[in-house]
Amino acid sequence: MATTIPKTMLAATVVEYNEPLELFKDIPVPTPQGSELLVKVKASSLCMSDIAGWMGHLGAPLPYCAGHEPVGIVVALGKDASSEFKIGDRVGFMPASRTCQNCAECTSGNHRYCDKRTNVGFDGPYGGFSEYALADPVSTVKIPEAIADDLAAPLLCAGVTAYGAVRKVTAHQPVGTAVNIIGCGGVGHIAIQYAVAMGYTVNACKSCAYV
Ligand SMILES: [Zn+2]
Ligand SMILES: [Zn+2]
């Protein structure tokens, strides 16, 4: 299946904090390096961290293309890409990119804390809000056919956050017992669904005195 990849693309870009994003029309489509994947973005949800970045709370270097929960189709592979991903795969990916794979964080499975990483969606000219973006295979998963693009996208940040929290909380807890979830927003409402799917009952609190 031949895919024509344009030379330039649209990219919704944060040019100034707290100002409307600018839609640039001539951002070069990036070329995958090493094992990277070039992904044609189909959907990318809006995370509270996108808002925090836009407000300047994360120190994201301006200008940058936002969006860190992208889902799309692999359209090109770097020359060192493994056989794990191929052109046509539907994937989602998380921000950590170009990690060193040598430091203590990388070798312990925590590459998202690698000091050398770049953060797609907080750093550079492409992200979830551009037509194409580069995915690091270590931060990329295939998306099952049964999950639509727009429903899969929030799972790439809110979803993994909720999943990790529920797994840790329930690590030594018998299935069928109750899990307490405080906050039912973007992350919490997914945590509730994961906990129920894992066989737990849920006590959920949607507002808290300290908020
Ligand atoms: Zn590293
Ligand atoms: Zn996020």
Image (cartoon, grey):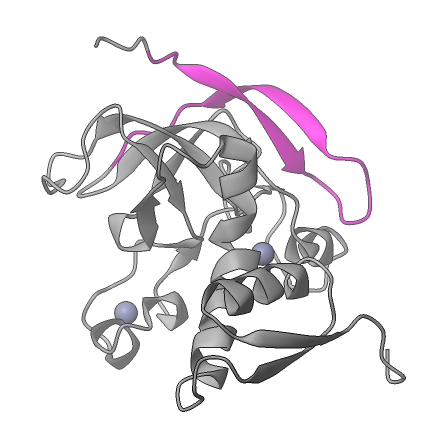
Residue 92: where, in percent of width, then height? 40, 42
On the picture, is 143 further left or further right than 59?
A: left
Q: Which quarter of the image is occupied by the C terminus?
A: bottom right
Q: Is 18 within the magenta?
A: yes
Residue sticking out furthest to the right = 209
Residue at 27% x, 72% y is: 109
For the record, the magenta segment spans 5-32
- Viewer-side residue, 118 vs 182: 182
- Classify residue 147 as left or right of residue 89: right
Q: Is residue 5 visible?
A: yes
Ligand 1 shown in quarter = bottom left
Quarter of the image that includes the N terminus: top left
**Number of numbered markers:** 0
Say whether residue 162 is visible: no
Residue shown at the point (32%, 48%) measured from the top left: 140
User: Residue at (49%, 84%) from the top-left corner?
Assistant: 169
Residue 77, percent across and down? Answer: 20, 31
Please say whether residue 191 is one of the residues in the magenta stretch. Answer: no
Q: How far from the left and from the top, in percent, is residue 163? A: 47, 66
Q: Horizontally, is 43 left or right of 136 in the view?
A: right
Left or right relative to 208: residue 158:
left
Q: Residue furthest front?
A: 176
